[in-house]
Image (tube, rainbow, N blue to C red):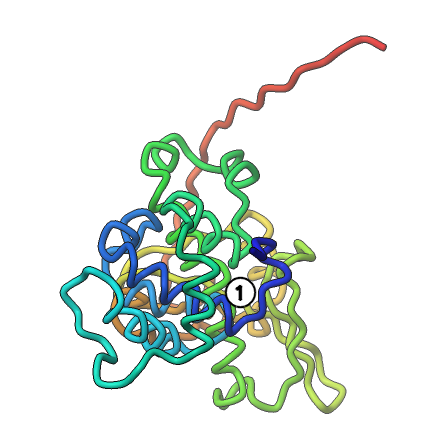
Amino acid sequence: MLLDPQKIPTREKLILTGLYLAKYDSAGLRKLGFGGFVEAFNVIGYALGQKPASIKNYRDEFDPLMPNKRRGWHKRPTRDYCLKILTEYKNLDMETFAGLIRAFAGYDESAWSEVQTKAEKRDGESFFAKRLITGLAAEHYFESTQPTLAQFKDFAVENTTRLGCGYDFRLHPQAGSDFLAVEVKGIKEKSGSVSLTPKEHDMASALANRFFLFVVKNFREKPFHEVYQNPLSGGLKFRKKEVLTLHVSWLTAL
């Protein structure tokens, strides 16, 4: 059985997510930190760069084969390639299966544990969902909608999320004018709060009208977005919050 998430094709990841949700139902949702199926479809779907409805369709595909209350696609036979996936992965326990789903989004339990707050560690199962909403899901939502947005549609997009430059995307115009910077944030509900890191705040200040805050809201139901140009000078009110962190390391003499 192939368990290396880097080698699993995207369609198979979608199928496996649908299988997991059909098999483990509400317990599986809680294990991943989701409050409902629509939220899981939205967040995992966008995180994989695919339509959320694809995961729902695959869950419905497996529902008739599972002991849950949904009937799913019960009026036709389960498709052969889905049955093949079921045969290969049916013996995975929930803990292993949930770990595989998390790995699809690049979630490393040991690495993320180093940046979790005490509250997040106490609520470890929801940490995965929160990180996807604020990270990959929101970023891929932006990439999927960018060509349709009037202020961004004629720009070439460069993903800078791994460069640590204080924003997630650099948008290059077709002509010779300066680039635009877009920082993407995501929240679960229709309203909430977002924070800027010191570097993001510095870049927002330095770039002024060339800096955009792109906020994806309502992953719990139906995501939509709001765009704030020059957010530090607009209608948003930011307040500085300082947190003292104790860093522990172990040294040895050589």
* Residue type beneath disc 1: Glu
Residue placed at 24% from the left, 56% from the top?
Answer: 35
Q: Position of residue 168 (x, y in %)?
A: 59, 64
Residue placed at 44% from the left, 52% from the top?
Answer: 131
In this rendered view, identify the residue nearer to me: 54 or 72. 72
Residue placed at 45% from the left, 57% from the top?
Answer: 89
The vertical placement of 34 against 18, above or below, is above
**Crowd band around label 1 with a 10 angstrom C-alpha radius: few (<14), some (14–19), many (20+):** many
* Quadrant occupied by the C terminus: top right
Q: Position of residue 243 (x, y in %)?
A: 45, 32
Residue placed at 28% from the left, 74% from the top?
Answer: 60
Circle 1 residue: 183
* Quadrant occupied by the N terminus: bottom right
Residue 125 falls in which quadrant of the image? top left
In this rendered view, identify the residue nearer to me: 55 or 182. 55
The vertical placement of 241 against 149, above or below, is above
Direction from residue 197 to residue 224 in the image, left or right:
left
